[in-house]
Amino acid sequence: MTAQRARREPAPGFFDLVTLLDFEEKARSFRGNKEARIVRTFKTSAARYYQRLGNVIDSPEALIHNPQLVHHLLDQRAARAADRAARTTATDRTRS
């Protein structure tokens, strides 16, 4: 196994693409704390979950599995990035 391939594979016991996307689709109807549910379900931190989700939604396999959800998540990510950029620009202007 190459080093590059080893980096792409999840650690043993880690969740797979389908499980993650199915969880994310159901998360729209969750009541309560999503982060706590992530920790209980996947036995990992919410930060690590969102890192993995970011990698998953960039994969062609995710787009094949659930294109509507993946496009929704990509749109959300783009909107958050635009918000961060706008805040950074506004902060830079006030410092000048």
Image: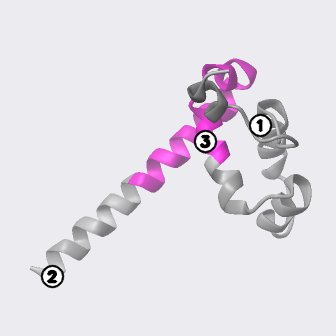
Residue 30 figure quarter: bottom right
**Residue 52 horizontal/vertical position (percent):** 66, 45
Residue type of the residue flagged with mark 3: Leu
* Furthest-left residue in this view: 96
Give the quarter of the figure containing the N terminus.
top right
Residue 67 among magenta residues: yes
Residue 91 among magenta residues: no
Q: Residue under circle 3?
A: 73
Q: Residue at x 45, y 45 (%)?
A: 78
Q: Nearer the viewer, residue 55 or 89?
A: 55
Residue type of the residue flagged with mark 1: Leu
- Mark closest to the chain's N terminus, 3 or 1: 1
Q: Categorize mark 3 by other alpha carbons within 10 Å: few (<14), some (14-19), many (20+).
A: some
**Residue 71 horizontal/vertical position (percent):** 59, 32
Q: Residue at x 45, y 50 (%)?
A: 79
Q: Is residue 22 above or below residue 90?
A: above
Q: Residue at x 86, y 52 (%)?
A: 42
- Mark closest to the chain's N terminus, 2 or 3: 3
Q: Are marks 2 and 1 in contact (CB under 8 Å)?
A: no
Q: Residue under circle 2?
A: 95
**Residue 80 horizontal/vertical position (percent):** 47, 55
Q: Which residues are magenta?
A: 52-81
**Residue 35 horizontal/vertical position (percent):** 77, 65
Q: Categorize mark 1 by other alpha carbons within 10 Å: few (<14), some (14-19), many (20+).
A: some
C-alpha separation, residue under disc 2 versus residue under disc 1? 41 Å
Secondary structure state at the residue bearing disc 2: helix
Disc 3 versus disc 1: nearer the observer: 1
* Dot label at residue 21: 1
Residue 88 figure quarter: bottom left
Secondary structure state at the residue bearing disc 3: helix
Name the dominant secondary structure of the magenta segment: helix
